[in-house]
Amino acid sequence: MFKNLFTPIKIGKMELSNRLVVPPMVMNYCNEDGTATERFIAYHEAKARGGWGLIITEDYAVDPKGKGFSRLPGLWDDSQIDSHMKLTERIHKYGAKIVAQIYHAGRQTNHFVIGSQPVAPSPIPCPSNQEIPHELTVKEIKEIVEKFGDCAFRAKKAGFDGVEIHGAHGYLIAQFMSPYSNKRTDEYGGSLYNRMRFPLEIISNIRAKAGNDFPIIFRISANEFVPGGRTIEDTKAIAVMLEKAGINAIHVSAGVYASAHTIIPPAAVPHGWITDFAAAVKKVVSIPVITVGRINDPFLAEEIIASDKADLVSMGRASLADPELPNKAAAGRFEDIQQCIGCMQGCIERLFKNIDVKCLVNPTLGREIEYKITPANNRKKVFIAGAGPAGMEAAIVAAKKGHDVHLYEKTDRLGGQYLLAAVPPFKGEITTFISWQKTQLNKLGVNIHLNTELTPDVVDMEKPDAVIIATGSKPTIPHIPGIDRQNVVTAHDVLNGKVDTGHNVIIVGGGLIGSETADHLANHGKKVTIVEMLPEIAKDEEANVRYFLLKDLKEKDVAIYTNAVVKEIVDDGVIAELAGKVEKIGPADTIVIAVGVKPVNDLAIKLEGRVERVITVGDALEARKALEAIEEGYSAGLEI
Ligand SMILES: Cc1cc2nc3c(=O)[nH]c(=O)nc-3n(C[C@H](O)[C@H](O)[C@H](O)COP(=O)(O)OP(=O)(O)OC[C@H]3O[C@@H](n4cnc5c(N)ncnc54)[C@H](O)[C@@H]3O)c2cc1C
Ligand SMILES: Cc1cc2nc3c(=O)[nH]c(=O)nc-3n(C[C@H](O)[C@H](O)[C@H](O)COP(=O)(O)O)c2cc1C
């Protein structure tokens, strides 16, 4: 099936068994002193076990003042070597190779993380971090060069197979390389030759300390996607300079913090969208080129290598979603692969709150130790009410434990509200997760009862040992005059295909559901207006997802009223209070209600005292999102 993906390749002296790479991803799992935790090691071990040829770790800080997040690994001191040696030893047991990414955040951090003023080539704040950095003196630059070399040497001592120099994403090295952030007029600024002095000095320092044989990968943003930033033409010239300086591979990414949606693109961005940049770099160098960017499928990865656009393929979030992807692909178990859906909720949304990374489709991420499924001692009869993502996940885990699982769903299909989440533009990949859950339920032989409501009577009759309540949530209907009119429908019914709307539509409520429903309708040629009581719409979306949603709404001329409270629904519009004034908004043929959801949890109350074990999960417990629903479903299945 795969003629290229599972062929070996060399990066310098490092031999890889296949072309599948885990790119660096900060998990925030380390100790604050930069040493490795068992959680950090077990997370990487799952990837090595899963068959990835090369694991590039998240960025190891070369200096504590260069940290961008609190719980990053570090090799700025010899005392940190031992804990990271445990990591490399565990990875090598599986035949995988592991390379440490080494970095300094420069101005893309803040004093809350490092306890002092960030540093940079020039005293210009990063537009997203907004802290004025200290302009490095030449002496300080030379000291940081030494720190990179020392860090690489420690990485070698810790058993890493090489290092990746983080020259991408707008961190310190990239700040020097780009006229966007480097305004110096000394030997480290101005011409490309001068701007490259810092990275080239780092490379020769690493070579001097870690030796000529120690593999060095250089990560670069092909295009920074900011006004005045570097472009692919600069990058091609840089790639040639880097190859001459002795690096062994180049890893082509994109963006800086101010264009964050290009570094970690959400589902709105096409698969493999920066691979053409990698192909352009590949044309000018002879060392291996690694590509990355929304590649979440082994067939896509195979095609990229087959068409000679890159030599290796990094699959970041795809490896979070399924650390076993390579093994499953090699074994032809495609239906078992859990694909990244580009939702950004567990990974980047949490990371930018400086907390630990999770994955919506893979609750075991970061919990490799405690979330192990072992066969239950007693086979129990487990009933689950509701086949949304929470109920299905609970059923999968309980069945894997060997229980006799019955999944009840009152409608005619599996997926719950998450089916509706897949309807708006950019969100179709949610179906890959629902269909993965369905496949697993079938393979595990879960008894599925569609069109069947789980009621206290059924429970009394069938006497299960445990019931998991995953009955989800339902739309909140506000008490406003006119709510019972014929022209009023819910966003849920619109997305469900139960009701059609007229041409002119007003959406009452501009949260995630309302805004996405607006996008869906506008995408079908409707004239849409959103009326929201808060100052901004879609604030409950992840920032990068929101960026594309707002862009799309703007392009489709969706009218947006904020700070507007709907007081009444009338025949052809709504009456709203805007900045103290009462106004009519319209005309509208249909009014769509999207003011939130509330838990459906009455079954739990009715079952009290009737069953030994009742666990409520997901929206039924508290209306939130699929991330929490799936996690709680998994944990409930495990608990039984
Ligand atoms: C338009 C839209 C977009 C969304 N986008 C996102 C998003 O981008 N990211 C995200 O994380 N979340 C999103 N959500 C929210 C997400 O879909 C929900 O949080 C999630 O589906 C909750 O899962 P659940 O399993 O707890 O409940 P539900 O998905 O609500 O499933 C509950 C199921 O239980 C069934 N049921 C109820 N009572 C019984 C009973 N007594 N017997 C049998 N069956 C019963 C229902 O029919 C339903 O199928 C979105 C929701 C919508 C509507
Ligand atoms: C949670 C998270 C943390 C990341 N941390 C790093 C990092 O430390 N260094 C780096 O070069 N890239 C980092 N990235 C970017 C990834 O390496 C990768 O380029 C990006 O996720 C796009 O690839 P993907 O679509 O395959 O996920 C991170 C991405 C994620 C999702």
Image: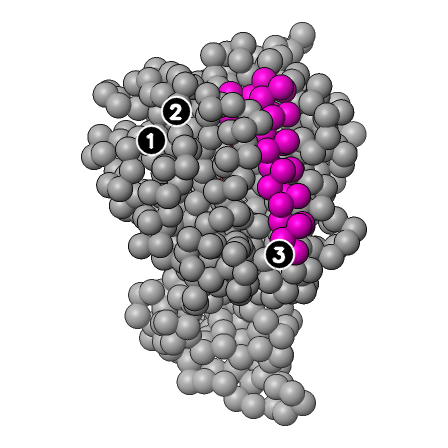
Q: Position of residue 422 (x, y in %)?
A: 42, 49
Kindly state the secondary structure of the residue where label 3 is placed. Answer: strand
Q: Are marks 1 and 3 in contact (CB under 8 Å)?
A: no
The first of marks 2 and 3 along the sequence is 2
Q: Can residue 69 be seen here?
A: no
**Numbered label attached to residue 288:** 1
Residue 341, picture quadrant: top left
- Please give the range of residues in magenta: 136-163
Q: Position of residue 367 (x, y in %)?
A: 65, 27
In this rendering, the label closer to the viewer, 1 or 3: 3
Q: Indicate the quadrant containing the C terminus: top left, top right, bottom left or bottom right.
A: top right
Location of residue 540 with respect to 618 vertically, above or below? below
Residue at the image point whose x is 39% and y is 62% from the top: 520
Q: Are marks 2 and 3 in contact (CB under 8 Å)?
A: no
Q: Position of residue 46 (x, y in %)?
A: 55, 21
Amino acid residing under circle 2:
Ile
Location of residue 464 with respect to 296 vertically, above or below? above
Q: Which residue in the structure is indicated by mark 3?
A: 120
Kindly state the secondary structure of the residue where label 2 is placed. Answer: strand
The first of marks 2 and 1 along the sequence is 2
Q: Nearer the viewer, residue 173 or 591?
A: 173
Q: Are marks 2 and 1 in contact (CB under 8 Å)?
A: yes
Residue at the image point whose x is 73% and y is 30% from the top: 77
The first of marks 1 and 3 along the sequence is 3
Q: CA distance from mark 1 to mark 3?
A: 30 Å
Q: Which residue in the structure is indicated by mark 2?
A: 11
Residue 456, picture quadrant: top right
Residue at the image point whose x is 63% and y is 31% from the top: 151
Outermost residue to the left: 307
